[in-house]
Image (cartoon, rainbow, N blue to C red):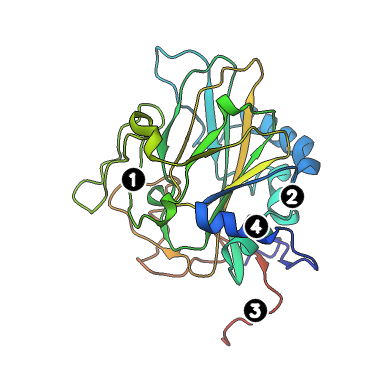
Amino acid sequence: MSAATKIATAPDAPILSGGDIADFRADGAVHLPGLFTEWVHLLRDGVAYNEEHPSRFGSNSLGPEEAGRFFDDYCNWRRIPEYRAFVENSCAAAVAGQATGASFVRIFHEHVLIKEPGTAKRTPWHHDLPYYNVQGRKTASLWLALDPVPLESSLEFVAGSHRWETLFYPRRFIDSTDYDYAGDGYRPVPDIDADRDSYRILSWALEPGDAVMFDFRTLHGAAGNSQATRRRGFSTRWVGDDVRYAVRPGETSPPYHDIGLADGDKLPDDLFPIVWFDPEYRPPSA
């Protein structure tokens, strides 16, 4: 465990309602309006710094003929103070713990995604778990809006898809092609847009400070940004007590394939520190 990481216990009163938790577990996604309003200005400052000082993972996921800008970057929470403050001091980890029923929650990574006005590029339908070197059921992403996001530019989720017991190929955002995971039991993502009436698709208009929380296994995508303002989203990814390291058959995002772990190993505290634990949890004796 990082000595600098603050560990939080469960709050005195539940942050989430019983309905929020039930919807998250049944649908794989839930809207949490206004939960992080107090963090918006600080995170905007952090995102501005991130844009000026991207990491080696920073990219613009647009082809040469595509207009606009679709910037994303991740794994910066340790070096950007505003991100670190949110990870360590907000209620995000506790929310993830309540939603998943985990005894403790680790930070996996953070991810900022920005679509500038006039960026028609869609985020392709995908789910996050096969991109990652982890496996388990107690997972939660919190996508926090830093700008108003109208319904036509918002994220969309296929309700219940986290319970399909299927892993789909990860897809590259720049051209929607599949990762080279051939021959390892992964399936192509179904063409959701060609048959939208066959699915229950969830989406919400968002105000700054609103969040959408979703399971790593939930299929989701997003339209381009047709509005006159930026669409900045700050995502944090959280993993609970059942999550273990997973070896994937090819490239991963983030690229955690070379950290010296075998399939099924527990995640190390120094790389993925525990940020929240339930006060009734008693860790095993050493």
Residue ranking furthest to the front: 197
Question: Of label 3 and label 2, which has the lower sequence position?
Answer: 2
Label 1 packing within 10 angstroms: few (<14), some (14-19), many (20+):
some
Gap in angstroms between the C-alphas marked 4 and 3:
24 Å
Q: What's the residue at 32%, 47% (across, down)?
A: 168
Give the quadrant of residue 33.
top right
Q: Is residue 265 above or below residue 118?
A: below
Residue ranking furthest to the left: 183
The amino acid beneath tag 1 is Glu
Q: Secondary structure at mark 3?
A: loop
Determine if residue 175 is in view. yes
Q: What's the residue at 55%, 65% (across, down)?
A: 240
Q: What's the residue at 80%, 68% (across, down)?
A: 12
Q: What's the residue at 37%, 61% (across, down)?
A: 246
Q: Secondary structure at mark 2?
A: helix
**Residue identified by numbered label 2:** 85
Question: Of label 2 and label 1, which has the lower sequence position?
Answer: 2
Q: Position of residue 3 (x, y in %)?
A: 69, 65
Label 2 packing within 10 angstroms: few (<14), some (14-19), many (20+):
some
The amino acid beneath tag 3 is Tyr
Q: Secondary structure at mark 1?
A: loop
**Residue identified by numbered label 4:** 19
Closer to us: 182 or 30:
30
Query: Closer to the observer: label 3 or label 2?
Result: 3
The amino acid beneath tag 4 is Gly
**Residue identified by numbered label 3:** 281
**Residue identified by numbered label 1:** 251
